[in-house]
Structure formats: structure tokens, C-alpha cells
Amino acid sequence: MTLRSLSEALKVSESHLGLLFKECTGRTFRAFLRELRIRHACELPSDPALSIKYVASVTSYKSTASFDRDFRAVTGMRPTDYRHLGAAAICASAPRHAI
């Protein structure tokens, strides 16, 4: 999902929708989507049998490097460290925003 595809579906300009989104949520659409995707990754089982590449793919990341960068930006740690330190406790402390 992109801001452009959403704006086309709603029949409003991309820039106007971006401004409205930021006004209503306090953050950009891109930041919101990143947090939503990482939150989804946090909710996946922390089973080591699920590769980081698989988790990245399931959360719509095309590269593990992008996933790793965004995961660290949102949670403060790498996905592999997250697995080792107790996924449920860390995920619960990740920033939550009203959706």
C-alpha cells in the first residue's frame, strides 16, 4: 500500500491526503505504515524456524536490509536480538499509536 494508491482510491490528491493524515495522526503515512508492518512482525511467532527473510517477506519488505533497518528504528534492536531477548516482552514495549 502506498499513499498514492490510497489517494487514487479515495479520489483525492496525494499531497492533500498526506497533509490530512499527518494532521490527524501526528505522523507521516510512511512512518505509520512502517510501524504497522513492524508491529505485525512483532506479533509473528518468535520461532527460530521462521527465517528473518521469511518474516520480512510476510510483512511486505522486499529486502531483509530494509526490514532490519526499519525494525531497529521502531523497536531499537535488530530482529535477531529481539528473538533472543524475549519477543513478547519487547513487542509490548514497542511504541503503540492509535490506528
Image (spheres, helix red, strand yellow):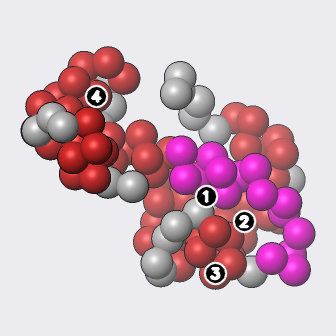
Among numbered discs 2 and 4, the one appearing first in the sequence: 4
Query: Are there few (<14), some (14-19), or many (20+) residues within 10 Å of tag 3?
Result: some
Q: Nearer the viewer, residue 76 or 5?
A: 5
The residue that mark 4 highlights is 21
What x and y, as percent, mark residue 54?
Answer: 68, 78
Q: Count neighbours of disc 2 (C-alpha within 10 A) and say few if under 14, some if 14 to 19, many if 20 or more.
A: few
Does the magenta segment cover residue 47?
yes
Question: Which mark is nearer the camera, 1 or 4?
Answer: 4
| Amino acid at the residue labelled 4 | Phe
Give the residue drawn at x 44%, y 72%: 66
- Rendered location of residue 46, percent (x, y): 84, 63
C-alpha span from label 3 to label 4: 31 Å
Q: Is residue 83 visible?
A: yes
Q: Amino acid at mark 1?
A: Met
Q: Which residue is mark 3?
A: 53
Q: Are marks 3 and 4 in contact (CB under 8 Å)?
A: no
Mark closest to the chain's N terminus, 3 or 1: 3
Mark 2 in CB contact with mark 1 (< 8 angstroms)? yes
As measured in the structure, the alpha-carbon distance from the residue carrying label 2 to the one carrying label 3 is 15 Å
